[in-house]
Amino acid sequence: MLKELDPILHSQLRLALISILVGVKQAEFSYLKEKTNSTAGNLSVQLQKLKDANYIEMEKSFKNNYPQTMCKITKIGIKAFEDYVKDIQIYLKPKKK
């Protein structure tokens, strides 16, 4: 029987965000918005879901009087991503007869 996929990561945008964050130390909101071609509203909602699951940390500050949100993946997020990739690989393996 196949394992249920992580519902937090089994969303196209959230998976894209985690995939980006795995490869960088941290990323600014505007960078993530550009890379995912997401709207600011949808991106905010999806980042909050990742934060609520403790998969990412967000730090809000100001830079030149403009709000800046920096995001970085947590150890829990890295583990969840690695587990998700392993689970997907199981789905993709040909079944032995």
Image (cartoon, rainbow, N blue to C red):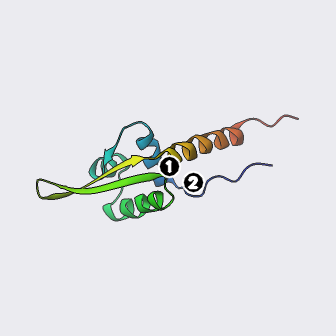
Q: Which residue is mark 2?
A: 10
Q: The residue under label 1 is which amino acid type? A: Leu
Q: Identify the residue shown where x is 76% and y is 35%.
A: 94
In the rendering, at what x and y percent does residue 48 appear? 42, 62
Q: Amino acid at mark 2?
A: His
The spot of residue 34 in percent (x, y) is 30, 48
Q: Answer few, some or many: residues within 10 Å of disc 2's Cα (few below 14, many 20 plus, some between 14 and 19).
A: few
Give residue 92's position: percent from left, percent from top. Answer: 69, 39
Camera-side residue of 44 and 78: 78
Vertical order, 62 against 21 (above or below): below
Rendered image quadrant of residue 24 = top left
**Mark 1 or 2, nearer chain start:** 2
Considering only vertical position in the picture, is 47 above or below 94?
Answer: below
Residue under the image location 36 percent in, 62 percent down: 44
Answer yes or no: do the residues labelled 1 and 2 have beta carbons within 8 Å? yes
Q: Quick check: 65 left or right of 83? A: left
Whole-angstrom CA distance, mark 1 to mark 2, is 6 Å
Question: In the orientation shown, which residue stands out farthest toward the left?
Answer: 64
Question: In the image shown, does 9 or 13 lie closer to the viewer?
Answer: 9
Q: How many marks?
A: 2
Front residue of 54/30: it is 54
Disc 1 designates what residue? 15
Q: Position of residue 95 (x, y in %)?
A: 80, 37
